[in-house]
């Protein structure tokens, strides 16, 4: 009587090690790029918020032709910026000076 052993399908230790090595290598290449993209997106968002505030300053000046300096509190009080926008403006340290918006 002949006894035969069946081969069970599966990965060998070498195959599993190679797969883990490749996954680790890909992670080393991808993660730094993700962090860099996150920083770039944050910078782009800050520039967009400055542009939004500047647009609202211009709109406020058009609606109030009597002149004078526009402040962030004027924009908030007269509902030119929403509460969420004002929270972002404060967190990004955006200021208005001489009716020009900038990030401090």
Image (cartoon, helix red, strand yellow):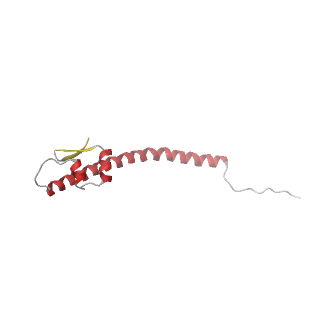
Does residue 84 appear to the left or right of 23 in the view shown? left
Where's residue 81, x and y in %?
A: 26, 54
Figure disc tally: 0
Q: Nearer the viewer, residue 14 or 72?
A: 72
Where's residue 34, x and y in %?
A: 43, 47
Where's residue 50, x and y in %?
A: 25, 49
5 lies above or below 24: below
Q: Nearer the viewer, residue 56 or 39?
A: 56
Determine which quarter of the picture holds residue 24: top right
In the current view of this chain or complex, which residue is farthest to the left?
66
Does residue 44 appear to the left or right of 62 in the view shown? right
Does residue 15 appear to the left or right of 83 in the view shown? right
In the current view of this chain or complex, which residue is farthest to the top?
104
Where's residue 89, x and y in %?
A: 29, 48
Determine which quarter of the picture holds residue 65: bottom left
In the current view of this chain or complex, which residue is farthest to the right?
1
Does residue 5 appear to the left or right of 66 in the view shown? right
Q: Quadrant of the C terminus?
A: top left
63 lies above or below 28: below
What residue sits 23% from the left and 48% below the top?
73
What residue sits 25% from the left and 53% below the top?
52
What residue sits 57% from the left and 45% below the top?
21
Q: Quadrant of the N terminus?
A: bottom right
59 lies above or below 43: below
What residue sits 67% from the left and 49% below the top?
12
């Amino acid at each position: 009587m002949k006894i035969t052993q069946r081969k069970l399908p599966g990965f060998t230790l070498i195959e599993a090690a190679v797969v883990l090595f490749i996954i680790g290598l890909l992670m080393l290449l991808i993660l730094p790029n993700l962090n860099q993209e996150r920083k770039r997106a944050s910078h782009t968002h800050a520039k967009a918020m400055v542009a939004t505030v500047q647009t609202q300053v211009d709109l406020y000046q058009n609606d109030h032709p009597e002149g004078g300096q526009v402040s962030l509190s004027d924009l908030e009080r007269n509902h030119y910026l929403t509460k969420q926008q004002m929270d972002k403006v404060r967190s990004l340290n955006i200021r208005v000076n001489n009716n020009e918006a900038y990030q401090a």
